[in-house]
Amino acid sequence: MPQSPCFGGIRQTVSRLSALAAIGLLSVALTAQESPSPQDTLDEPLLPPVREAPQPRDVRAIDLAPEASAPAGDPLDGEVRERLLKLRHGPFLRGASVKVDGHWEFKQSDRWIALADGVVESTRLEHRVIRELRERESALGRDAGPEERAQLAEWAFSEGLYREGMAHLDRILERWPDNAEALLLLGDPALPFALPPGTGDAGADVAELAVYGGRAPRTVQELVVRSMGTMDDELVRAELTRRLRSPKSSERCFAALGLRRLYPEGVALQELLRRSVLDPFEDVRHSAALALRDTGLEGLTLPLVRGLESSSSVIRTHSARSLGVMGFSASVEPLATRLVTLRTAAGGDGWRAPASNIFVGRQISFVQDFDTEIATNAAIAKPVIGVIQEGATLDVRVHGMSGGTGGSGGLSYSHNTETKAIRRALASITGEELRDTNTAWRDWWEASGRDWLSKHHPRPGQTAPPAADR
């Protein structure tokens, strides 16, 4: 799903929350006096100073314990760098920091905060950690699966790169919406995340969260849905159902996600069916189809199967795609039948589009001879007119149509688009690895399609195979 321009603000909010959460834990962690820790070390030597720390600074101490004087020649003295400070109890501080007289100081807004000795467990330069993250990402390659990508996001979190880790999880959930590793990482209570402050009005708070979720990236949407699960059930159900009809596609998409996560038994099924076929945006159709899939109700395929026989190529294509996302075995037979009925007298994949022709040319008249007629005392020459014709006759076939305003809201449908949607749906449901051609799938259906149906979709009176065999 395309990200909104406000996502950058959400990322900055997460970063600020990380710093505030870490500072809030200091006051609890340092109630007991502790002895100073050994001198902090960096993973690599520092670069030359970027700038000197302002002197004098307005420093606010937080539970400042007795400090040991910094050793002579300490390279950290007076050097302000963008660092990741890992605190003793787990959280990170990310931003400008400096070590002065043996203790760390962290800049928040326009003031410096002094940290007690022993609070900072380790430090790393921010740009070095980001560079290592990029190297790890490059080593994964483009073909890396969701598990490897989730491990990379987990490493980013462990180093304090929350923004970057969330961005990696966004990409995972956009491609694999139900990836368990990514969802488990989002369930970590240590993840710095906070919702907009409530107003005290339960209805207004639910509506505000629905709007907030519609603007948020995928990771934040999952966190918002979990928070909505702790609120009044009737209000949440009604608000998400109402947002399915929102004029904003992002809110419709988020509403379908919320209904899928919170009400897998099925809510607003009629509207979800409409959105899975008729919504002009692919992300909304996909999200609605996933919500229908999670209900486990195979009977929901019937309206979409009827859509395969629509006179509109748009509806037929959308119906085939949504059936593939839903993944019910009952959809295989109507999809395969639709593909078979597209065969023409030419056989194979020789589908012929409707044709017409047009002639573009010119005609030239000339006198090519005379027809002489002899009458009494007279001879009459009657001219014979000839015509020269030159030009071209063009055969025209309509293979598809396109239009709209472009992007995900435009239209681009053809015979090839429809058959491709059917083939992809069959591959998704059956798990068969065939050539992506109409002929290959027609041959499969004629040779083994009925056997596949009897195994995975038994008729009344038959026994379904064990789940492990499906």
Image: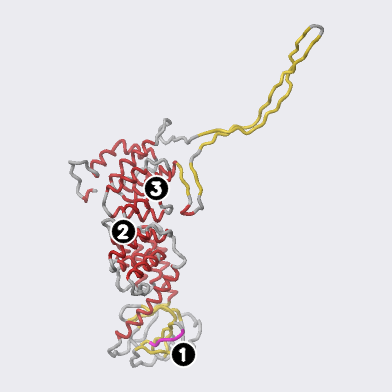
Q: Is residue 113 magenta?
A: yes
Residue 280, numbered label: none
- Considering every residue shown, the one lying at the far top of the view is 376
Q: Position of residue 102 (x, y in %)?
A: 39, 89
The answer to whether residue 219 of the structure is visible from this angle is no
Q: Helix, strand or loop at disc 3?
A: helix
**Within 10 angstroms of label 2, few (less than 14), some, or many (20 or more) residues?**
many
Side (left or right) of 279 relative to 30: right
Q: Secondary structure at mark 1?
A: loop
Where residue 350 sits, quadrant-wise, is top left
Q: Earlier in the sequence, mark 3 or mark 1?
A: 1
Please rate how many residues cluster around mark 3, counting C-alpha atoms within 10 Å: few if below 14, some from 14 to 19, many from 20: many
Amino acid at circle 2? Arg
Q: Which residue is mark 3?
A: 318
Q: Residue at x 50, y 39 (%)?
A: 398
Quarter of the figure with residue 174: bottom left
In this rendering, the count of numbered labels is 3
The boundaries of the magenta stretch are 110-114
The image shows residue 451, relative to residue 231, as above or below, that is above
Residue 307 position within the rendered picture, expressed as x and y whole percent measured from the top left:
36, 44
How far apart marks 2 and 1 lie (CA) works out to 52 Å
What x and y, as percent, mark residue 82? 45, 79
Q: What's the residue type where badge 3 is placed?
A: His
Residue at image point 49% right, 91% down: 55
Return the mark for residue 57: 1
Judging by the rendered image, the residue that carries numbered circle 2 is 260
